[in-house]
Image (cartoon, rainbow, N blue to C red):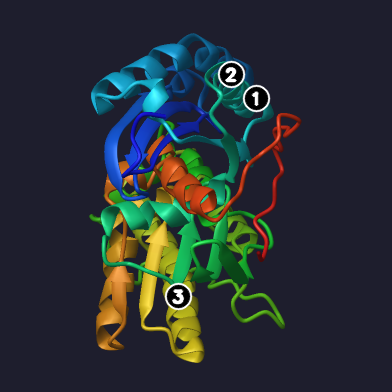
Amino acid sequence: MKIKDNIYILGIESSCDETSVSVVKNGRDVLSNVISSQIDIHKLYGGVVPEIASRKHIENIDIIYKESLKQAKLSIEDICAIAVTYGPGLVGSLLVGLSFAKGLSISSKIPFIGINHIEGHIASNYISNRDLEPPFISLIVSGGHTNLVKVESYNSFKIYGKTHDDACGEAYDKIARVLGFEYPGGPKLEKAALNGTQNKFSFPRGEVRGSIYDFTYSGLKSHVINVIHNIKQKNNESIDNQTISDISLEFQNSIIDSLVNRTISLSKELNINKVAICGGVSANTAIKTALKNECDKNNIKFYFPENIYCTDNAAMIASAGYYEFINGKRSKLDLNADANLEFTDK
């Protein structure tokens, strides 16, 4: 290891359909963040095909790794540790990144650290917000997760809310598909909502009995799908663009209410005046704007990552890896990919 003054972490992310390798200095300075997306491939099938995703990771990862070091203007000898996503995600995709990290660790005699993908999303805000330090409230919104968390320190978390069924991003994609938007449908639904008329529909705001900070979206999803099907039955299986926009707007309003109300309530209860949103759905402008407005009303500082760090990327994994590395964490070579890895208190 040539460089002593700074800590350089190589991050590897391959949990779904993005192959990404990044080099981050001291947890917050991104020297490279190379991402190879497979969206155009999976768009043909209306969603991610696991076998195709893992095959593409195998084809791309060595190329992405070399390009990441090149952009960072470093060699592997300069790297202090390798941080890699080991779950949750698609098991075949995870295994590609994890196996590559292990091989690199053995050949270069550099330690590697397995990172929970959700902890990576939380760390994305450290990259975009230099002044953000724990404790703060983190709202995690992605295709697979919806969590409300107190970030107590860089290495400890307490979960106050989680979804009991669909994640909000999953609900977005399912409703978008029924409305006829091609994959990935969430951003297209958000765009359609811009032309919607308020109060044309009334959709439920799901609540979990006895769990004021937990989320539920299956009831909302089923209700909206039934509304769409009823409209199509009355109109010879057609639905006009304005109605699509009206449904999109009210669906999005329901999602926003559920996220914003719980987040602000928890911030007040715990007397923590910092809120950070993260995850793929945090790229949604309407959600960010609504949460920021409520934070401003309540004198709460609001943080969000740049869009490039909202979706799956290796920079956030490297950032999380940095804080684990300086805390003394190291992983053993028998670490296995865990497709269903849970995000729990720690």
Hey, what amino acid is under mark 3? Pro
* Picture layout, residue 46 above or below residue 52: below
Q: Are marks 1 and 2 in contact (CB under 8 Å)?
A: yes
Which mark is drawn over residue 109?
none
| Mark 2, secondary structure of its residue | helix
Q: Quadrant of residue 64?
A: top left
Q: Position of residue 139 (x, y in %)?
A: 46, 65
Dot in front, 2 or 3: 3
Which mark is drawn over residue 54?
2
Residue shown at 41%/39% (left/top)?
185
| Mark 1, secondary structure of its residue | helix
Q: First in sequence, mark 3 or 1: give its number.
A: 1
Q: Which residue bears the numbered disc 1?
A: 95
Q: Which residue bears the numbered disc 3?
A: 135
Residue shown at 36%/83% (left/top)?
273
Question: Is 338 situated left or right of 270 in this image?
Answer: right
Label 1 Cα neighbours within 10 Å, binned few <14 / some 14-19 / many ≥20: many
Dot in front, 1 or 2: 1
